[in-house]
Image (tube, rainbow, N blue to C red):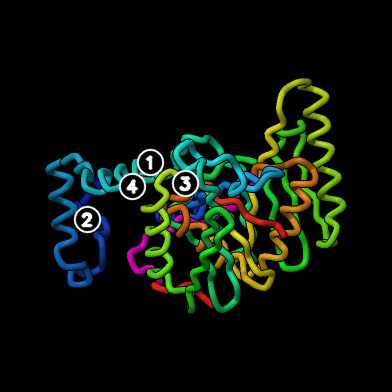
Amino acid sequence: MAINFRPIKSKIEAPGNHIKPKYDLDGLRARKEAQKAAKSTPPLPLTSMIDMLSMLVIFLIMNFSEQGDVFFNQKDEVKLPRAENAAPLEGLPLISVLEDRVLLEMPDTVIGKKVSIEDNDLETLLRVRRVLRYVKQKHDAENPGKEFRGAVNIQADTGVESKKIKMVMNALITEQWLEINFAVRKFSGKSQKTAMRN
Amino acid sequence: MLVILLIVTAAWNHLESFKTKTDSVTAAESTPPEDEKKKQIKLSVLIQPKEINLKLDEDGQIYPFIVKDFDREEIKERLALWKQRYPKKKDVVLITDNSVDYGQMIEMMDLLVAGGFPDVGVSTQ
């Protein structure tokens, strides 16, 4: 018995992107196919790369410091006064004069370890003075005959009474720390006030 | 990211300082330059809450100059006059009233340095 194989037209078709082309985004399919055909290499975004490079160069220039890494921890509650004619800040032990306390911080380059002392007694500043005295004595013992520089940076809020600054200065002078620097923020704007604040 | 980094680090890049050398002898009492040896010149600035006294002491003869309302222009003019009269003089003693704030003290130091007096000695009395 002969079997008659009739070719059956398949009802299964390879699926398209969508059931109906009307759901396709305009031109998307055409563009994708055109891209495939062209096999084009993606363009190099030169403009944005140059922008990035310029910003990086500016950033590096701004960060460049002849003095190296300056030891300075600016406190949140301290708003430094502004000045036009100050000299670059050196990395020195830092004294922060706050409303109710004085902080002394030193980098590890001074006595081999980091120092951070808080003193609430503004009248005597005993704790701060003890550390200052220790640093000077250590220097004198290790470097006999070599003069002690005794340099320090002071940071204080614009509104702090100068009385407190003078108290700290007196403590420094008593302990033979005679080179006192006041940290300021550089001011180069043209809209300078014509009168000092009262 | 880079912009944020620039803004965050901006504060560090603009820090500077004023130096004051506080020896046992104040700056104004130091040895005067050769040509001014004949006259003992002492310049001092006293900051008070309402006024500034720019004081010239010439051989014990005191010439005060009071500036009201902290007029910067007037202070600059007086400092220019001092500089014109004593071009080699570089030191001034800055005395502040206890109630005067640190901002005013620094502002005065800034004016003194700008006026040609870089050796500002701060009195701790």
Helix, strand or loop status at disc 4:
helix
Residue at the disc numbered 1: A61
Tag 3–tag 2 contact (CB < 8 Å): no
Determine the CA span between mark 4 and mark 1. 10 Å
Q: Amino acid at mark 1?
A: Ile
Residue A23, given in percent of the width and then of the height, sits at 22, 71
**Magenta-colored span:** A180-193
Residue at the disc numbered 4: A55
Helix, strand or loop status at disc 2:
loop
Residue visible at 71% across and 65% down in the picture: A163
Q: Quadrant of residue A150?
A: top right
Query: Mark 4 vs mark 1: same chain?
Result: yes
- The first of marks 2 and 4 along the sequence is 2
Determine the CA span between mark 3 and mark 2. 114 Å
Tag 3–tag 1 contact (CB < 8 Å): no
Residue visible at 57% across and 47% down in the picture: B19
Q: Residues within 10 Å of mark 1 (few under 14, many from 20)?
A: few
Foreground: B27 or A14? B27
Residue visible at 75% across and 21% down in the picture: A145
Determine the CA span between mark 1 and mark 2. 78 Å
Chain for disc number 4: A
In front: mark 1 or mark 2?
1
Foreground: A78 or A153? A153
Determine the CA span between mark 2 and mark 4. 69 Å
Chain for disc number 1: A
Helix, strand or loop status at disc 1:
helix
Point out which mark residue A51 bears: none
Q: Amino acid at mark 4?
A: Met
Residue at the disc numbered 2: A8
Residue at the disc numbered 3: B89
Residue A173, compared with residue A96, is above or below; it is above
Residue A105, given in percent of the width and then of the height, sits at 72, 47
